[in-house]
Image (cartoon, rainbow, N blue to C red):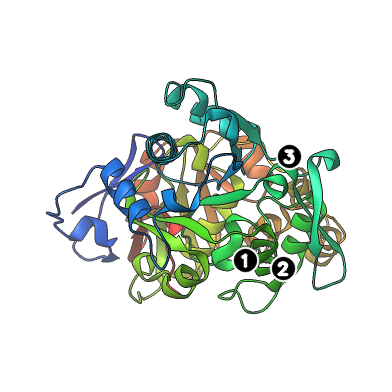
Amino acid sequence: MDVSLPYGTQSECGFMIQAAQTVNLPPQLTSNDTTTTIPLVEVANNGLNNPTEFPALSDTIFSGDTLAIAVEPDLPKCGELLHALLSYLRTNTLLSANDITIVYGGNTNQFKSLTLPEQLAGIFDNDLNFEVHLPEESEKQAFLATAENGEPIRFNKTLVDADIVIPLSVQLPNTLSDHSGFYHCLYPTFADHAAQSQTSKDSTGNETQPSQDAITTAEMLGVQFIIKVTPGIGDEIASFAAGEIKTLASQLDSSEQRYPEWDAAQLTVGTISGHTSCNSWETIARALNTLADVTLESGTIVLCTEMDEEMPSILNALRAPDSPDDIEYHLEQQASPHLQIARTLFQLRDLFHICLLSNHNPAEVESLGIAPIEDVAQIQKLVDASPSVNCIIDAHRITFR
């Protein structure tokens, strides 16, 4: 049986499974979906005019309001979604471009790869305002509230100052413990460096519930309306939801992204596909956590991406020739928003043989204790040597939990 798994923007990971091998395939490869796709702009307009437990969005925005759109990273069809939302605002409200600021929660390179200013030009008479959230720059943060631990929550100043904040966000399963549930699109995404680092350091023990700090942030910002999309394969959208934030928080779950229970396999092959802005070390950690759930201990995990994002500096600790206890101690002493990423790689590389296909320098990948794969053909050899194989598309966006 030939298997082809999409990864990156247009790449395919192809290999052959023998009849004697046990295999689990992703539902996307085994179902015949004949549903007619409704244009995204039509879906968005309907959702904005008929949101869940909320008036039509146009009835809640008035002349003179300042609006900030908080855009979460890893958002599929980001440009198209923003175009649909802004076109709706242009047609149905009295807002001008000067009243609107789009605040992006990813890094500068991710923002540049989206080319949003070019995609959204011409909707309004004037140019829109864009901002990339820079958590390490204190002058761009403002006090918002006090956290549960007594520390101040300093938050993106543009969002704090806006009359209305609309999160444009993605529904993801909780496969990293610093993903604070439904409200992650606000906190810690748009918090300052200290809050992001503390959230990454904390382990709540209950990853299915949002932290109180995340809920407090939404309340203090006055956020009442939210847009949530559930991703499909790659840059596709499986569902669109808009409405009152607490109602959607109680209604939406990860059921569309939860796979049925699978037996663990000797080899699990996973991918990350979609726009290049979705390729980050956080998505790598998310995907590996999911793949580990269905891989036998000491088995092999293969992850296929086109990721070339610069490695967070905290990953240098994994290169040290120290004992595992010393590495773990060194990690816990660092204040970094990427601590959960480092923890995940550190823990899983000792339990599994991890292989990564990416656009990174193979020597850099190998220095992390991960085997670099430079050609898809190498994966066939791993498949041939494994009695059981699990295959997962977009492992960073699904869960077995």
Q: Mark 2 belongs to which amino acid?
A: Asp
Q: What amino acid type is highlighted by mark number 3?
A: Leu
Badge 1 or badge 3: first in the primary sequence? 3
Say few, some or many: other residues with alpha carbon within 10 Å of mark 2 (under 14 / 14 to 19 / 20 or more).
Answer: many
Quarter assignment of residue 33: bottom left
Are dots 1 and 2 in contact, CB under 8 Å?
A: yes
Q: Report the disc number at residue 337.
A: none
Give amino acid for label 1. Answer: Ser
Quote the CA–CA distance across marks 3 and 2.
20 Å
Residue sitting at x 51%, y 38%: 277
Element marked by disc 1: loop
Q: For mark 3, give the secondary structure.
A: loop
Residue underneath mark 2: 213
Q: How crowded is mark 1: few (under 14 residues within 10 Å), some or many (20 or more)?
A: many
The reply to whether discs 3 and 2 touch (Cβ–Cβ < 8 Å) is: no
Q: Can residue 376 be seen in this view?
A: yes
Percent across and percent down for residue 226 are 49, 57
Could you say which quadrant of the image residue 105 lies in?
A: top right
Q: Is residue 262 above or below residue 145?
A: below
Mark closest to the chain's N terminus, 3 or 2: 3
Left or right of residue 244: residue 50: left
How far apart are labels 1 and 2 at the CA level?
Answer: 9 Å
Q: Which of 180 and 1 is in front in this view?
A: 180
Instruction: Please name the residue that numbered disc 3 is placed on.
Output: 134
Q: Nearer the viewer, residue 319 or 193?
A: 193
Numbered label attached to residue 180: 1
Give the CA separation, mark 1 to mark 3. 20 Å
